[in-house]
Image (spheres, grey):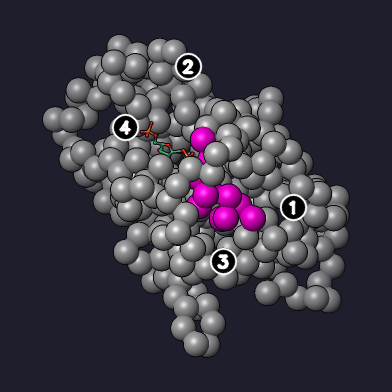
């Protein structure tokens, strides 16, 4: 956890804040997982994006909110499930950091018991900010095994999170995660009739080259791309030109991770990390994966 004597006013302290953030996230993961069986139903509320919130979303949001606002050096907590930021003390950008999360990504998979995740971005600026202000990002994947992928300026690594009588442990299982050079899988969200023609034409080409792997949770689908190489997209839709995914909580952290693993991420025109948000709940089309297919896609959408 954070060194209590550390001076979080010193920007060099980013490493210890980031470490404490991911300690806190790892500590909540077994608890979130254990709470899911009884929370596979809708909560009856809608979030800031107008989407129905599952009981599991609310539980994960509360737990992570409590854990992350208690971390020294976290000055602001922003969640996909909350309208506004929570002030956690400390001036963001002046030694304190803003943490943005999607507490339970892919929670519509709760009913069918498929993979889900938690997405975390640590920003060195008050939100809304661009992805260039990220100092670290990561995700937890609740698959058959609970894993956590963490990226910072030094690279990307994967850990296994386990809990036993001694508490929660983090074991690094891959210390320099890189995208395989040869892409193998693809997964695209949304309904084909809602895709713009240019994207449909690109998808038809990719279908002949790569294997379809789509599970309906961005974290799970991007994790497959990181593991096997390939491309994931939640594209712009004809009636929703900004797509579905949120820039601050989903696209930016994923772009940061994939780019540090040697890949690329775009909104179709520019690097995701350069997209200027107007609000924290802004949506953005996301195309992410190996550089080859992402560059081809950009050309196809041009
Ligand atoms: P959520 O964070 O509210 O669960 O929504 C985001 C999820 C992503 O994980 C996934 O890529 C997408 O929504 C799936 O949407 P669809 O069911 O339209 O394919
Ligand atoms: Mg999500």
- Crowding at mark 4 (Cα within 10 Å: few <14, some 14-19, many 20+): many
Of the numbered discs 3 and 4, the one sitting upstream in the chain is 3
Q: Mark 1 points at which residue?
A: 97
Q: Where is residue 176 in the image (x, y as percent from the top left)?
A: 42, 63
- Mark count: 4
Corner quadrant of residue 298? top left
As measured in the structure, the alpha-carbon distance from the residue carrying label 3 to the one carrying label 2 is: 35 Å
Along the line of sight, which residue is nearer the eye, 128 or 56? Answer: 56
As measured in the structure, the alpha-carbon distance from the residue carrying label 3 to the one carrying label 1 is: 20 Å
Of the numbered discs 2 and 1, the one sitting upstream in the chain is 1
Q: Describe the element under mark 3 as helix, strand or loop.
A: helix
Q: Mark 2 points at which residue?
A: 241
Q: Name the residue under label 3.
A: 28
What number is the disc on residue 188? 4
Q: Tell me: residue 86, above or below residue 286.
A: below
Q: Describe the element under mark 4 as helix, strand or loop.
A: strand
What number is the disc on residue 5? none
The residue furthest bottom is 166
Left or right, residue 199 beside residue 56: left
Of the numbered discs 3 and 2, the one sitting upstream in the chain is 3
- The residue sitting at 76% across, 47% down in the picture is 86
| Quadrant showing the C terminus | top left
Left or right, residue 124 beside residue 192: right
> Which quadrant contains ligand 1?
top left
- Crowding at mark 1 (Cα within 10 Å: few <14, some 14-19, many 20+): many
């Amino acid at each position: 956890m954070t060194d209590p004597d550390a001076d979080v006013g010193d920007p060099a302290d980013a490493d210890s804040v980031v470490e404490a953030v991911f300690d806190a996230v790892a500590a909540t993961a077994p608890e979130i997982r254990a709470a899911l069986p009884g929370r596979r139903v809708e909560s009856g509320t809608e979030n800031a994006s107008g989407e129905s919130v599952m009981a599991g979303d609310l539980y994960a949001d509360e737990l992570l909110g409590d854990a992350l606002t208690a971390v020294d050096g976290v000055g602001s907590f922003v969640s996909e499930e909350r309208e506004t930021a929570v002030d956690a003390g400390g001036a963001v950008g002046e030694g304190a950091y803003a943490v943005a999360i999607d507490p339970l990504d892919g929670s519509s998979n709760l009913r069918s018991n498929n993979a889900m995740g938690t997405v975390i971005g640590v920003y060195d600026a008050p939100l809304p900010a661009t992805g260039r202000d990220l100092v670290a990002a990561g995700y937890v994947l609740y698959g058959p095994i609970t894993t956590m992928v963490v990226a910072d300026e030094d690279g990307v690594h994967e850990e296994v999170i386990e809990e036993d009588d001694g508490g929660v442990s983090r074991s690094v299982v891959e210390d320099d995660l890189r995208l395989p050079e040869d892409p193998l899988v693809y997964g695209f969200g949304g309904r084909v009739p809602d895709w713009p023609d240019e994207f449909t034409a690109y998808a038809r080409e990719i279908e002949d080259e790569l294997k379809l792997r789509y599970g309906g949770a961005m974290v799970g689908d991007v994790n497959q791309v990181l593991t096997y190489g390939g491309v994931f997209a939640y594209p712009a839709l004809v009636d929703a030109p900004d797509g579905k995914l949120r820039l601050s909580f989903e696209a930016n952290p994923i772009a940061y991770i994939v780019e540090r693993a040697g890949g690329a991420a775009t909104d179709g025109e520019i690097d995701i990390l350069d997209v200027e948000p107007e609000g924290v709940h802004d949506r953005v089309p996301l195309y992410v994966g190996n550089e080859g297919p992402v560059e081809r896609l950009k050309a196809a959408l041009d």
